[in-house]
Amino acid sequence: MKLSSSKARMWCRTIHRDLSFFFSGMILIYAVSGFVMNHRDSINPHYTVARTQHTISDLPPQAEFNKQALLELMEQIGVDENYTKHYFPKQNHLKVFLKGGSSLEADLTTGEICYESLKRKPIISTMTTLHYNPGKWWTWFADVFAFSLIIITLTGAIMLKGKHGLWGRGGIELLLGIAIPLLLLFFVK
């Protein structure tokens, strides 16, 4: 049984449409998270970072500073995150680590305190995690997705005929879509 070109195009449209709908969520996830990852120098894809400055004049010196003094300091500036540990990287300079990645630095001499709060971005952080391949289960799904993108591309290239198809404007656009990234890769550093 020979498949006519019109039936082949019909099958291409069906396969192209169904795979496109099925994987449209993944395409959007990769597009949004890829954009954010391309701009990591100005967008942190995982956390919102907020810094607040405080000044407290009556901090005890390093020799008298203990965990109780630290907890009182945290209460004074309104930090309610759980304490993990602290140390003094240099004389009278306190560094405190808090659960969740937040931190606190204090100059015990001047009373200047910098609190850095990290809050996880729940949606975009999860989306960008997919780019880092979070597990073997994801490898399988991502491989099926990659193979399906090849099928979507091939069926899209052959389902139109005439001046809009592969031997017309579509073919020119296909060649440009291949040539531009290659030229950028080789000539733009």
Image (tube, rainbow, N blue to C red):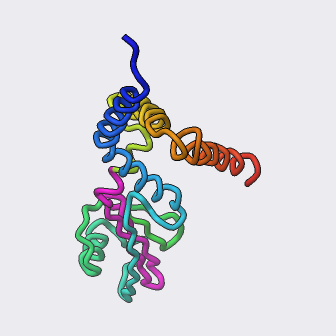
Q: Which quadrant of the rendered structure holds the C terminus?
A: bottom right
Residue at x-position 60% and y-position 47%: 177
Residue situated in front as seen by the camera: 64 or 132: 132
Q: Which quadrant of the rendered structure holds the N terminus?
A: top left
Q: Residue furthest right?
A: 187
The answer to whether 132 appears left or right of 17 in the picture is right
> Quick check: can you spot residue 92?
yes
The percent coordinates of residue 106 (x first, y second) are 43, 75
The image quarter containing residue 33 is: bottom left
Residue at x-position 38% and y-position 62%: 47
Q: Which residues are magenta?
A: 97-126
Residue situated in front as seen by the camera: 6 or 87: 6
Residue situated in front as seen by the camera: 70 or 133: 133
The percent coordinates of residue 36 (x first, y second) are 45, 59
The percent coordinates of residue 54 (x first, y second) are 38, 84
Q: Is residue 132 above or below residue 91?
A: above
> Quick check: can you spot residue 138?
no
The percent coordinates of residue 181 (x first, y second) are 64, 48
Residue at x-position 66% and y-position 50%: 180
Q: Residue furthest top?
A: 1
Residue at x-position 46% and y-position 52%: 34
Q: Is residue 82 above or below residue 159?
A: below
38 is within the stretch colored magenta: no
The answer to whether 154 appears left or right of 144 in the picture is right
Residue situated in front as seen by the camera: 80 or 30: 30
Q: Is residue 58 above or below residue 159?
A: below
